[in-house]
Image (cartoon, rainbow, N blue to C red):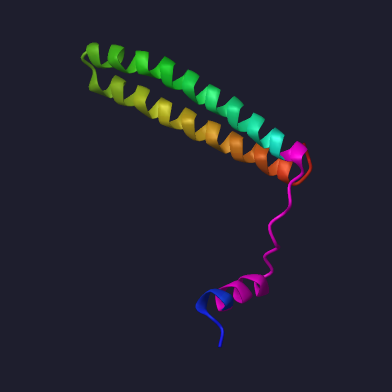
Amino acid sequence: MKSALEIAMERFKQEGEAEPVKLTPEQKAKLRDVDRFIDSKVAEKKMIFEQRIPEARASGDPAKAEQVSQELATELSRLQAERETKKDKIRQGQD
């Protein structure tokens, strides 16, 4: 009798999903480099915006503070998307 896990794995394979790709050491190194690069960009953006948010709040305009917070969220989202795009290219061998 098959376990629930075995049944789920069979269904997963039947849906046409490929086995996980084996990465070369070079690809793994490139993936780490992408993570380091994007992590540094994220830290840089946070530092910049963490200075701007208190300034916006001090101006007395709550809408301005909210706008700066939204800009930070947008920038962080863009960086995460960039990270995934670069990593997908490396995984597919298109680096």
- Out of 68 and 16, give the one closest to the viewer: 16
25 above or below 74?
A: below
Question: Where is residue 52 shown, x and y percent of the image?
Answer: 36, 14
The magenta segment is 7-27
Left or right: 81, with 51 as reference point: right
- In the picture as drawn, the residue positioned furthest to the left comes out as 60
Left or right: 2, with 86 as reference point: left
- Out of 30 and 89, give the one closest to the viewer: 30
14 above or below 87?
A: below
Left or right: 51, with 26 as reference point: left
Q: Is residue 11 magenta?
A: yes
Which residue is drawn at the image coordinates 66% and 71% (left, top)?
13
Which residue is drawn at the image coordinates 42% and 26% (left, top)?
72
> Which picture quadrant has residue 30?
top right
The quadrant of the rendering that contains the C terminus is top right
68 above or below 81?
A: above
Question: Where is residue 51 shown, x and y percent of the image?
Answer: 36, 13
> Which picture quadrant has residue 26?
top right
Question: Where is residue 2 shown, x and y percent of the image?
Answer: 56, 83
Q: Is residue 63 magenta?
A: no
- In the picture as drawn, the residue positioned furthest to the bottom comes out as 1
The quadrant of the rendering that contains the N terminus is bottom right
Query: How many discs appear?
Result: 0
Question: Where is residue 68 shown, x and y percent of the image?
Answer: 36, 22
Which residue is drawn at the image coordinates 47% and 22% (left, top)?
43
